[in-house]
Image (cartoon, rainbow, N blue to C red):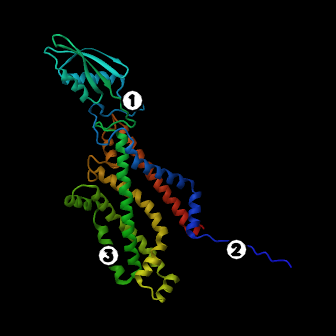
Amino acid sequence: MTDAVQAAPALGRSLWADARARLLKNKAAMVSLIYLAVMTLVCVFGPFFTPHAYTTIYADYTRVPPSFSAYPKADGIEVALKEALRRARLDIRDWQQDGSRIIVTVTSAKPVDERSTRYLDRSDVFENAQVLEKSADGLTLKMAADVEQKHFYFGTDSNGRDLLTRTLVAGRVSLAIGLLAGVVAVVIGVLYGAASGFMGGKTDEIMMRVVDILYALPFTFFVIMLVVFFGRNFVLMFLAVGAVLWLDMARIVRGQALSLKRQEYVQAAEALGVSRWGILIRHIVPNLLGPVVIYMTLLVPQVIILESFLSYLGLGVQEPMSSWGVLISQGAKSIPGAQWLLFFPSFFLTSTLFALNFIGDGLRDALDPKDR
């Protein structure tokens, strides 16, 4: 007697599993996702490993160009030495460099105070200054000091601050505002739009008229009013941007909710006695996640651009904190003599926006049920 061999039934894939498989095949989206993850990690943890703090000012290294070799350069040592001893009112008889150490002989019409070595220590170029010998009349003094090596891979700004550290710290602010304000806009917009579309009737009319009134308020005027009442700070940027961008999300979600509430599973839930709030949370909102996820990836670049625009106008984050928009604004004023001040923050901002847009396009293609 032969046993009938039955083949195991093939398991189907859910919409989310199918979307994930198609997203993994999208090379542009996956490369952008990896790049965005790396960029976020670098901006969050990078400043802990850079050689300079973002607030440290090096008066002797203002607007120095990017370089992989250490500063000071050969010609910069003599300039810094003359400047430090000029403040001490001493004349240089001769000086020489021995590796990373300099030996200088100074003279003066009056006896030289040995504490003059402090002027070398106050410089950003020298450290560990000490007196080697002093003439009998006290008018000549030989000093030695170590040349302090510093690296500025992105150069420095007009105040002598390391641009690499400031660009990474600015990335924290821009990405945080983009993600946090985007999440707030999505949460408010989804709940508001889903409630408006599902309730319908006069409730829908009233809620949408509120949205129309808020649309009529000029965004820049709204931000200026917030600045007048609450001052300029990071939280203000977060509230100002998030409080405006949820309006678009609410309109999009409302249109989707109007279509979903006519589906059979919603009518079945109503027939079973499920409350309206339960239907909204358990049936309407979960089925809106596809368009919402896609729109959020496109919303984050919009938030970052808005923050950069406000910072460019001087309404954004303030010193010593910075953002990519602030750095771009400062770099635009230094194009003739210091192009790197504009190039690096612009590159970081532009590449991040490209990555977010590619991810959004990939999610749109992956979550479109018509392409299954």
Q: Quadrant of residue 158?
A: top left
Could you tell which of marks 3 and 2 lies nearer the N-terminus? Answer: 2
**Residue 331 on image: x %, y %:** 33, 41
Pick whichever, 40 or 247, lies toward us: 40
Q: Quadrant of residue 56?
A: top left
- Circles 1 and 3 in contact, beta carbons < 8 Å: no
Q: Secondary structure at mark 1?
A: loop
Q: Which corner quadrant holds the C terminus?
A: bottom right
Pick whichever, 33 or 351, lies toward us: 33
Figure label count: 3
> Circle 1: is it few (<14), some (14-19), or many (20+) Cα within 10 Å?
few
Q: Which corner quadrant holds the N terminus?
A: bottom right
Left or right: where 155 falls relative to 355: left
**Residue 371 on image: x %, y %:** 59, 66
Residue that label 2 marks? 9
Task: Please name which of the two marks, 3 or 2, marks the residue nearer to the observer.
Answer: 2
Pick whichever, 56 or 334, lies toward us: 56
Could you tell which of marks 1 and 3 lies nearer the N-terminus? Answer: 1
Q: Which mark is residue 209?
A: 3
Which amino acid type is marked by label 2?
Answer: Pro
Could you tell which of marks 1 and 2 lies nearer the N-terminus? Answer: 2
> Circle 2: is it few (<14), some (14-19), or many (20+) Cα within 10 Å?
few
In the rendered image of this protein, does residue 334 appear above or below residue 37?
above
**Residue 5 on image: x %, y %:** 79, 75
Give the alpha-carbon distance from disc 1 to disc 2, as whole Å. 67 Å
Give the alpha-carbon distance from disc 1 to disc 3, as whole Å. 62 Å
Q: Which mark is residue 70?
A: 1
